[in-house]
Image: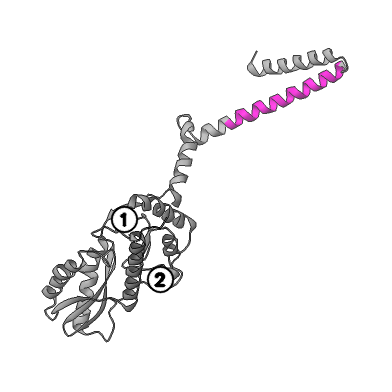
Amino acid sequence: MSSKQFFCKTLQFSVIVTSIGYGYITYDLVLTVSKMLRNTVRFCYKAVKLNKLVLNKIVPPAQKCILIPNQRRNFMTSLPRSMFVQTQETPNPNSLKFLPGVQVLEPGQTMDFPTGQDAYCSPLGKHLFRVEGVKAVFLGPDFITVTKVDDETEWKLLKPEIFATIMDFFASGLPVLNEGTPNADTQVNEDDSETVQMIKELLDTRIRPTVQEDGGDIIFKGYEDGIVKLKMQGSCSNCPSSTVTLKNGVQNMMQFYIPEVLGVEQIEDEQDLVVKSQFRKLEDKLKHKEATPKSD
């Protein structure tokens, strides 16, 4: 007797015994119910056998146990939520470079947000400024540089929140920029002199890629009387070694390739000066408040 026949007989016997025990079901009804149950079991047995046959044709028996785990694992790794964000130190101890592993801006483009108000055009920038302790945000082609407020703020407290913010943002599908144009200062114009064209080309090909590796950028602001005017952004803006970088690195390279260049000068916009002045006033106010003894 096969397992199917044994199962059918067991069900039939159970129904008969139960019916006789209660005494209110006729023998004809018992036979009818038993026949229905037998047909149902036969149908289920054929369905299970058919499913096993189809599964064996699609997936070899050795792979059946890993089919669903593999599918689940591949699906999870394709989600932006499971992206792996790396960090890279910069010459500026208060700035840290975050590498999300996805494109942030177009190749060669950068955006600088010294304050939260400047990030009005960037949903990513606005999300990062909501993290307490973030002072400035700088976006590059494949990286995000975050500058903290001061030396007392510890990266080990900031990094988890920044990691979560970056992953949540890219999982949301929002654009990095709603409006605004990335830096295009080195684009050659028709009215540029030959010297200015050479300066822009040198910045684009030799200098900016190296500076962007450190999480910053150098913006061309003008050329006058042999002096190249540049502006530091990102991790380079408040870096202690930015002056050395300009003089020993950028200026020497400029003078080597372009004899017309007499020197390099770092300039700051009026807005940057105002921001720095307000920040210093806030720092002085906080220090004065901490130094003032509390009255009982």
**Number of disc labels:** 2
Q: Is disc 1 surrounded by few (<14), some (14 to 19) or many (20+) residues within 10 Å?
A: few
- Taking the magenta stretch, the answer to whether it contains residue 290 is no
In primary-sequence order, the first of circles 2 and 1 is: 2
* Residue bearing the label numbered 2: 118
- Which residue is more in the foreground, 268 or 125? 268
Q: Which residue is more in the foreground, 210 or 61?
A: 210
Q: Nearer the viewer, residue 115 or 21?
A: 115
Residue 204 at least partly seen: yes
Q: Is residue 183 visible?
A: no
Q: Which residues are magenta?
A: 27-51
- Residue beneath the point at 46% across and 45% down: 76
Quadrant of image for the C terminus = bottom left
Q: Main secondary structure of the magenta part?
A: helix
Q: Where residue 72 sits in the image (x, y, percent)?
A: 48, 41
What type is the residue that disc 2 sits on?
Asp
Residue 152 numbered mark, or none: 1
